[in-house]
Each structure stands twice: as structure tokens, then as C-alpha cells.
Image (cartoon, rainbow, N blue to C red):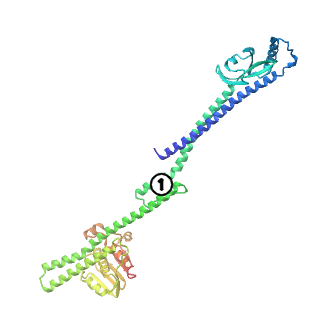
């Protein structure tokens, strides 16, 4: 069962119980009041009747008057007064358990027990489907004790009480319908932010991690939304952190594999030379030196790339000043005459990382051109420029060239063994030196990559 249904049932039940109790109390009170008023009216009529009987002039009767004469006079006055009273009531006069006068067809003395030691009595009873109030009172008339009875029809009063009960039931029904409608609307309106919060949670679970719950009230739901947003912030931050760690691990593995290709090619080439070339002491020494140099550079660059691309963001490159000329001499040993290197001045930075940067740029330039194309490399103080006259790069790709594993021509990159990491590594190395990398290219005309080293590391 949904929460809004539960809350509606609870609130509706509470409201209906409260209304039912109030209407029951009101109906019972009204019924009791109506019946009490009817009985009181009967007693008042009886008291008034007896008061009129007491006006009989006792001095006008002689003590020698016979008993039958006295009773006849009382009976006469009783009949006269009864005709003068309310026609909805009937009166009875009893002495010594005998009726002297009786207009009630229901034998009130038999239906209402009344003794001499009682001043008066009253009773409501049902006769032939109608409600009657019977009351009795003792009165002394001309020296004798009489019992006067009144029988009043109060069916109309009971009918009125029944109407009140029916009206109460109708009000109960209307209240129930209104309560159902109002409770449903109010509860669903109150819980609408909960549904929005649930939808937000589902969308976040589907990958919209930046989405947050909105709230306009200051109630408990708003407090829940605030806590939910705090939780979403923490989750998003953790996901970003894990994503960054994953990407950096992926980039690190790719970078290590990428950087091992060139030195491994050199190692394999010089080892092959040892096997195939005439074995002279000079050739052997030269090949051994080249293999050692490539191995040492591979070891250094691997360690530095692991620090540069690792999760430790506090890593700072070791900056030292060096001459571009000696740097250029090392590069020339790895490339043929297609690569023109111009070097002047000094640079400050990590020599191994910058060597990897320039080497990546030269390799990319060579792969971009034909077999007879040339690559121009300019090393001037804190500026590096590598340009080619190759096929160029379409403008729509320029903004994404430094993204890890991004390749403009995927088929051609695979043919050359490329995985799209060269420029991303170059960008990371440039930024580690406090600089930046800029790419300018015209399609079918060539590309120029410029690296500005603004400071001594981060």
C-alpha cells in the first residue's frame, strides 16, 4: 500500500471517528433535551391543572355534606377544568383506586405505578406505536386525597428527535465524502515533494549525478531534501574522484605503453645491429652505449610519468637548466634528415619529460605527412615549436586533440600503432611545467604545435 493511501486512511479514519462521536453526542443530547422538555411540559400542565383545582372554595361546602356529594362536586370541577386545558392531553381523577373521571383510553393508573407516599411520578411509554408521557400528582380536595393523572402524546417530539438523528446521519455521510476528497487532495499535495524526490533519486541513479532535489517549503520534507542533496553532493564527489582515479590509471598504463615503444625500438634495433653487423669493438661499444642510454631513459621516464599521472596531485617536476643544443644533438641521433632541428638558448625544466614531449610531437608530425615530408623543430629558450607540411587537421577536431585516447583518423592511427595518447601526454607535461600547449592547423596544409614553458614547474 502506498504511503499516501495509508496517510489518507489514517487521517480519514480519525476525522470520521471524531465527526461521528461529535454528531452522536449532539444527537443524543438533542434527543434527551426534546424528551426532557416534553416530560417537563407534561408536568407543568399537570401542576397548572392541580393549581386550578385548588381554587375550589372549601368554605362553600358544609362538613355535613355527604361524601358522594363532595366527590360529585370535585368531579364536576375536574371535568370543567380538563376541557379548558390543552386538548393534546387527557386527564384522569382517581380516589380510593377508583376512577371518578377518565378521558384517557390507556388506563394510566395501571401503566404508572404511584403510591400514597409519593408526591408525584412520571413515565414515558410507547402505546400503539406512539410515545406518551404519563404523570401523576396527589392533591387534597375538600378533605380527601385524590390522584390526578395526565397522559400527553409526545410522538411529535420523538419524531423531531428522529429527524435530528437522520440529519446527523446525513451530515455524517456528507462529512465522510468531504473528508475523503479533502484528505486525498491534501495528503497527495503534501507528499508531492516526496514523489519529486523519488524521481530525482531515480534520475541520479540513471547517471544524472549533477541533478539535485528542489524544495520551496520549510517542513520536514524540505529538511529531507536538503539532507538528500548533501548526500548527492557527497556521492557525486566520490564518483568524480573514483572516475578520475580510473581515468588516471588508464592514462598511466597507456602512457607507459606509449613511451616504451620508442626506446624499445631503439633497443631492438641496436641489438639487431650487434647480431648482423660486423662485430668490431667500436660497433659493440656504440650499440651497448645506445642500449644503455635507451634503457636508462626508459627507466627515468617511466618513473616520472608514474608520478606525473598518478593520483598524487602534489607531484612537482624537478626543474633544472640545460642547453637546447645538447638536447637537439640527442634528438638528431634518433631521426633522419626529414627532421630539421634548430636550437638556441637554455630551458628550465625536467629534461627527460621535455625530451618525451618533443619526441611525441616529432613522431606525430612524421606520421601526419608523406614519406618525403619534412618536420621543423624550433627550440628557443622556454618555447618549443614543431611544424609539418602534412595533411592537417579538420577544425572540428582541434578542441579534442589533447583528450586521452582521442584519434582523428582511427584507421590510420591503428596502422601506425597509435592509441591517441601522445598529445594528451604532451599537454600534461606542458602543464606540469606551468605552461600550455597550442595547436594551429590547416586542412591539407600542415600543423604547428607550440609549447610555452612559462615557469619552472608547477
Is 264 or 233 nearer to us in this picture?
A: 233
Q: For this view, does 202 lie left or right of residue 188? A: left
Where is residue 408? Give x, y as percent.
33, 69
Is 317 or 390 nearer to us in this picture?
A: 317
Quarter of the figure with residue 132: top right
Quadrant position of the C terminus in the picture: bottom left
Q: Residue at x 79, y 25 (%)?
A: 48
Q: Residue furthest right?
A: 60
Where is residue 135? Give x, y as percent.
71, 23
Q: Secondary structure at mark 1?
A: helix
Q: For this view, does 131 lie left or right of residue 144? A: left
Is 440 or 291 nearer to us in this picture?
A: 291
Is 193 or 164 nearer to us in this picture?
A: 164
Q: For this view, does 7 lie left or right of residue 93? A: left
Quarter of the figure with residue 280: bottom left
Q: Which residue, given by chain and number where applicable, does mark 1 sit on?
A: 197
Where is residue 386? Give x, y as percent.
33, 80
Would you say residue 21 is visible in this rendering? yes
Picture layout, residue 397 above or below residue 279: above
Q: For this view, does 166 lie left or right of residue 448? A: right
Amino acid at each position: 500500500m502506498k504511503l499516501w493511501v495509508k496517510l489518507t486512511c489514517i487521517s480519514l479514519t480519525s476525522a470520521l471517528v471524531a465527526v461521528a462521536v461529535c454528531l452522536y453526542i449532539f444527537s443524543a443530547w438533542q434527543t434527551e433535551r426534546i424528551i426532557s422538555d416534553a416530560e417537563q411540559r407534561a408536568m407543568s400542565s399537570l401542576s397548572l391543572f392541580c393549581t386550578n383545582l385548588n381554587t375550589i372554595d372549601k368554605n362553600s361546602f358544609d362538613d355535613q355534606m355527604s361524601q358522594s356529594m363532595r366527590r360529585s362536586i370535585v368531579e364536576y370541577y375536574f371535568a370543567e377544568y380538563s376541557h379548558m386545558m390543552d386538548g393534546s392531553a387527557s386527564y384522569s381523577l382517581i380516589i380510593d383506586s377508583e376512577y371518578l373521571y377518565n378521558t384517557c383510553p390507556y388506563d394510566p393508573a395501571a401503566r404508572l405505578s404511584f403510591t400514597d407516599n409519593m408526591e408525584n411520578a412520571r413515565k414515558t411509554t410507547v402505546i400503539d406505536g406512539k410515545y406518551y408521557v404519563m404523570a401523576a400528582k396527589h392533591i387534597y380536595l375538600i378533605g380527601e386525597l385524590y390522584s390526578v393523572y395526565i397522559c400527553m402524546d409526545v410522538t411529535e417530539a420523538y419524531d423531531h428527535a428522529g429527524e435530528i438523528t437522520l440529519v446527523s446521519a446525513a451530515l455524517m455521510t456528507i462529512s465522510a465524502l468531504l473528508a475523503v476528497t479533502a484528505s486525498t487532495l491534501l495528503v497527495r499535495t503534501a507528499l508531492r515533494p516526496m514523489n519529486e524526490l523519488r524521481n530525482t533519486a531515480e534520475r541520479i541513479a540513471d547517471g544524472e549525478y549533477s541533478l539535485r532535489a528542489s524544495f520551496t517549503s520549510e517542513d520536514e520534507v524540505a529538511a529531507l531534501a536538503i539532507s538528500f542533496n548533501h548526500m548527492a553532493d557527497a556521492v557525486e564527489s566520490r564518483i568524480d574522484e573514483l572516475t578520475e582515479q580510473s581515468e588516471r590509471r588508464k592514462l598511466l598504463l597507456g602512457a607507459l605503453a606509449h613511451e616504451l615503444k620508442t626506446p624499445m625500438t631503439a633497443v631492438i634495433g641496436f641489438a639487431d645491429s650487434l647480431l648482423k653487423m660486423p662485430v668490431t669493438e667500436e660497433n659493440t661499444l656504440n650499440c651497448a652505449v645506445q642500449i644503455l642510454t635507451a634503457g636508462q631513459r626508459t627507466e627515468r621516464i617511466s618513473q616520472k610519468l608514474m608520478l606525473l599521472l598518478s593520483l598524487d596531485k602534489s607531484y612537482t617536476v624537478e626543474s633544472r637548466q640545460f642547453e637546447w643544443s645538447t638536447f637537439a644533438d640527442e634528438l638528431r641521433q634518433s631521426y633522419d634528415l626529414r627532421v630539421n632541428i634548430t636550437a638556441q638558448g637554455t630551458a628550465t625544466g625536467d629534461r627527460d619529460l621535455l625530451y618525451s614531449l618533443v619526441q611525441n610531437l616529432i613522431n606525430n608530425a612524421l606520421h601526419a605527412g608523406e614519406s618525403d615530408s619534412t618536420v621543423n623543430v624550433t627550440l628557443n629558450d622556454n618555447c618549443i615549436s614543431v611544424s609539418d607540411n602534412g595533411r592537417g587537421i579538420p577544425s572540428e577536431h582541434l578542441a579534442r586533440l589533447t583528450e586521452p585516447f582521442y584519434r582523428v583518423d582511427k584507421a590510420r592511427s591503428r596502422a601506425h600503432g597509435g592509441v591517441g595518447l601522445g598529445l594528451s601526454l604532451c599537454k600534461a607535461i606542458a602543464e606540469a611545467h606551468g605552461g600550455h600547449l597550442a595547436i594551429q592547423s590547416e586542412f591539407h596544409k600542415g600543423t604547428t604545435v607550440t609549447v610555452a614553458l612559462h615557469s619552472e614547474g608547477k
